[in-house]
Amino acid sequence: MSDTQSPKEEKNKGGRPKVHNFDYEQITRLGELMCTKQEIAHVLGCNVSTIKRDQKALEAIETGYSLGKLKLRRAMMRNACENMNAAVQIFLSKNLLGYSDNGQLDGEASQPLPWNEAPQEEVKEENATDENATTDSQ
């Protein structure tokens, strides 16, 4: 070691030094507001590719997105059920329950019920039996 270097200084190992120490809680809060990666990078003062390379930052963003969606869902349910907002109730009915404007349900529930047609002779016999039963009871 030379006299000009102090013991704390390390020899330059090459490459660019790591300059970003992210506040992952801040990244989670920004994700909760549904900020894009570009917006988060701008707030943090770095490039988007820097965030994309940091696995922990990506996990914080995904956690924030999930928390934001949960808060939005909770607010929508509160607005629909407690405040009785008809527009939100209709929106949730269409998106969560599968309702539509044309009265059709999406999915398996919209399939027609099975229909078995009885032969015409059996139907005539049943009608005659029903008519006899009604005349007998009168």
Image (cartoon, grey):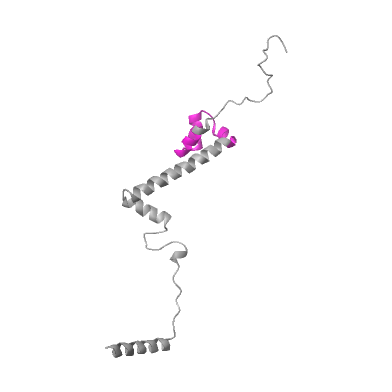
* Residue, far left: 138
Q: Nearer the viewer, residue 64 or 134?
A: 134
The C terminus: image quadrant: bottom left
Image point (42%, 47%), residue name: 73
- Please identify the quadrant where the N terminus is shown: top right
Magenta region: 26-55
Most extreme residue toward the front is 137
21 left or right, relative to 9: left
Q: Is residue 101 above or below residue 68?
A: below
Q: Write the residue at 49% across / 31% down.
A: 42
Question: Would residue 138 appear left or right of 44 to someone viewing this image?
Answer: left
> Would you identify the image quadrant in which residue 120 lies?
bottom left
Quarter-of-image position of residue 53? top right
Q: Is residue 118 above or below residue 26?
A: below
Residue 19 x/y as whole percent: 58, 25
Residue at 34% across, 47% down: 79
Q: Position of residue 29 (x, y in %)?
A: 47, 35
